[in-house]
Amino acid sequence: MNVDSDAMGMSGNPDPSTDHGGNGYSGSVDAKDVAMIPRITVQSFCLSESTMHTVEAATEDRRMLKAHMKIEMGGIPVAISTFEQAPTPNLIIVETSGAREDLLQSLDRLAEYCDAGTKVIVIGDVNDVTLYRELITRGVSEYLIAPVSIFQLIGAISNLYNDPEAEPLGRTVAFYGVKGGCGASTVAHNGAWCLARKFDSEVLVADLDLPFGTAGLDYNQDPLQGVFEAISSPERLDETYLDRILAKCNEHLSLLAAPATLERTYDHNEKTFDQLIDTMRLSTPHVVLDVPHTWNSWVKNTLLNADEIVLVAEPDLANLRNAKNMVDLLKQLRPNDRPPHLVMNKVNVPKRPEIKPDEFASALGLDVQAAIAFEPQLFGTAANNGQMIGELDGKHAIARMFEDLAQSVSGKAQPTKSSRSPLGELFSKLKRKAG
């Protein structure tokens, strides 16, 4: 649950301490003032049929077209049982009824399974200023009084994700091959596909290798527009324009393809891709950047500003030298960020002398996230078919490696009954302070 002690309801609403109308703290909402909801995943757990019908109707509204909504009955107990075994979405909506203490205890349990960044809207039947303030203090993003209208609900969601002062919705993951031909693009595309599939979360892949990008081939897409059009028209670039030039690969995965032509040269300056990346982060939870193996100001700038970096290397001496140079640079320029993830690719090529993956990683001061075996039949067939490894053979060990990589870069905790997420610990500390 996002902790936001300043979140006192929707914009333009009166202070809750002055609201005694019994209609909830959100007040009336004008449909024309409600902004579009970005590409988020939402799970709603209702108690009453009236709330369920309201949520269903809200999902049909044009402002919710980008969002993916799942609706279940059962309230917080069903939400807890669901997220004991599954990662949490971007937003959870829970309906509650009953005593104040029961509600707080139930939310405490739910918080144990919430990933950092998950927001929570509570719909309750108690019009109590003290309860409202305690919920906000304990990490709940918004509290609405039942019965809620369609536009109260959409407006509350919109406010959470369209606040200009809020952190961007999306996290960027940059994949970079330390030597040409080591397969970084293949790793990036398979990792992004698993990220979308594993978490049912929106993922946007941007192929930044404009002359030679392969994402269109790998995803079996041939879009007419993509990255080049986006960076060539910065005055037009916004979320609406971005939606028009995206290629939809599946329900949760979109592609901003490279032109992959040599009709022109692509001479970018350091900040060429900044506006595009910022725009993508505003509307999509996961942005995967397929960064080409080259070294210039814009590549360096893109890597330094990414939330996560995945370095892909083959187990030989030239790759080790390049990887060491990159790790040292990142350590110097990103001292407070997590070290890059290391993926060893094309391991165990017959008759080729190789550095063992663990020794390779040890020389860099990193751990091996994945050691992907040299499987030319598997990867060649997938490439020729425009498929991902998980589509071709979902039970293959390499498919599971890509799933583990997606888990690692997602920023989401692996759900377990026995361990609490850092967010749950934070929630408990806030609870003790509030008490």
Image (cartoon, rainbow, N blue to C red):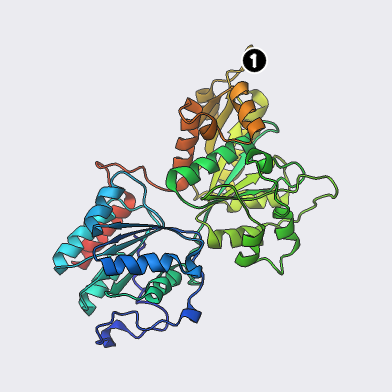
User: Is residue 423 placed above or below 373 in the rendered structure?
Assistant: below
Q: Quadrant of residue 378?
A: top right
Q: Quadrant of residue 385?
A: top right
In terms of depth relative to the viewer, which is nearer, 71 or 9?
A: 71
Q: Position of 31 compared to 246: left or right?
A: left
The residue at 51%/61% (across/down) is 66
Q: Position of 153 compared to 322: left or right?
A: left
Q: Quadrant of residue 13?
A: bottom left
Q: How many marks?
A: 1
The C terminus, quarter of image: bottom left
The residue at 50%/73% (across/down) is 35
Res 409 visible: no
The N terminus, quarter of image: bottom left
Residue type pointed to by label 1: Arg
Res 9 visible: yes
Tag 1: Cα neighbours inside 10 Å, few (<14), some, or many (≥20)? few
User: Is residue 330 placed above or below 151 in the rendered structure?
Assistant: above
Could you tell me which secondary element the residue under label 1 belongs to? loop
Q: Which residue is mark 1?
A: 352
* Residue 135, horizontal then vertical, whole percent: 26, 69
* Residue 26, horizontal then vertical, whole percent: 34, 79
